Each structure stands twice: as C-alpha cells, then as structure tokens.
Image: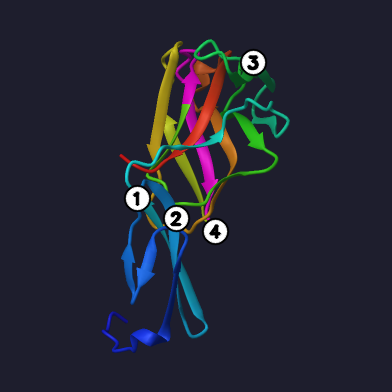
Amino acid sequence: NGQAVITDQASFTWSTTIGTIKNGKFTAPNKDGIGTITVKYGSKTTTVPVVIGEVAPTILESFNKGISNYEASGDRVNSVSVESVTSDRDGSKALKLVYDFTGTTGTSGAYVDAKTSLTITTPAKKIGMWVKGDSKGHWLRSQITDASGKTVQLDFSKNVNWTNWQFVSVEVPAGLSYPLKMALPVRYMETENNNKTNGSIIIDDIQSIYKD
C-alpha cells in the first residue's frame, strides 16, 4: 500500500542473466546486452528486464526461411492471399499481402496471421517493420497480446500513401506484461466505402526496438 517495510537483506535471493549482483547491488557488464534480474523473497519471485547500452533491434521475422508460418485472412474482402517474394530493397525474402476490397461496404481488412505467434520477451520501446506500400491510403496496424491476455492494437500508419520502401514503427504501450505475442503482425484495413481498392503491400524485417 505504498508503505516502507524494513526487511533483512539476507531474506532476498538475487540472480541475473547479465552482469553481477552482490549484496543486492547490480553491476552491469562492460558490453551491451539484454538480460533479466530476478529476486526471490520467501515464496514470491519477480523478474525485471535489463537493457544495457546500444542494443540492436531483434528481428522477429525476416521471412528468409519462407512464409510457411503465415496465412492470410480477412473481413469484408473479395480475396486475400500471401506469397513469398524477393525484396528489391536488399535482395532477401519478404512477404507480399495481396487483397481486394472493391465493392464491399463496412470496415474491410486483410490480415497476415502467424500460426505460431511472434514473441517479444524483453520490454521494447517500439515495434517496427519495412513496408513497400501501394499508395492506396489504407490503414496499417498490428495486434499484440500481453501475458495477462490484454490485446492491444498498434497503428503504424493510418494512410499508406507511399509506393517505395519505408520503415515504420510504433511505440509499445507501457504497463504491459511480458512476453508479448503477435498473432496478427499485419492488419491492412479500410473504413471508408469510397476507398475500397485492390492492391498489395510487401512486408520485411518485423522487429522489436529497445532504444529511442
């Protein structure tokens, strides 16, 4: 209840996957990295993440091993599909989402479903990805679920108005319980009936980002 409690330091058991802890004091290593600190008091245990230095983003999905973990789904669409393509950004593999919203009414969506969810174990500042747009002005989103079952929608862009490659990112809300799961890493949507088009976008290098 916000009250200070006097305890015996010997009652706590500390451990870490990075650096060292002595008498409850954490000392970071002389290198960048990601780890955790765990403290145990009686039957209670809690773990907190640690990010040290300039940690590179973690690539959650590069699509270089194919797209067998992914399938397409949609709402109010004539058709939607995914295919593996060679990226003209760097020559690696990428995922292409093809959709047709024409003639539909209401909110349309074309989705990339992960059969096995992408997982973010260490608290991230942002989630990002490379996107080759189709300049149709649709809404690019993602969906994550935290360890408590809370589902959060993330908006990368409410107006995909570009046709070249562009890196997009969105801040991860504070207060989520980790790990995070991404079962719907890509949601491409349109709410306006007068902008129901067909087209395709290409996605590559979905990643978690730990520094601003």
Q: Which numbered marker is on residue 52?
A: 1
Horizontal relation, residue 56 to residue 107: left or right: left
- Between 17 and 93, the one nearer to me in the picture: 17
Residue that protrudes farthest toward the right in the picture:
68
Examine the rendering and report whether any part of residue 104 can be seen: yes
Question: CA–CA distance between discs 1 and 2?
Answer: 8 Å
- Please report the bounds of the magenta region as a residue range: 130-147
Q: Amino acid at mark 4?
A: Ala
Horizontal and vertical percent for residue 126? 40, 40
Q: Is residue 159 shown to the viewer in this render?
A: no
Check disc 4 and report the residue beneath it.
147
Which of the labelled discs sits on residue 12, or is there none? none
Query: Is the Cβ of the residue at disc 1 closer than 8 Å to that at disc 2?
Result: yes
Badge nearest the viewer, 1 or 4: 1
The picture places residue 176, in percent across and down from the top left corner, at 44, 56
Determine the residue located farthest toward the left in the rendered image.
4
What residue is rendered at 58% in x and 18% in y? 92
Give the alpha-carbon distance from disc 1 to disc 4, as whole Å.
24 Å
Q: Please identify, in this view, whether the residue under mark 4 or under mark 3 is nearer the observer.
A: 3
Q: Amino acid at mark 3?
A: Val
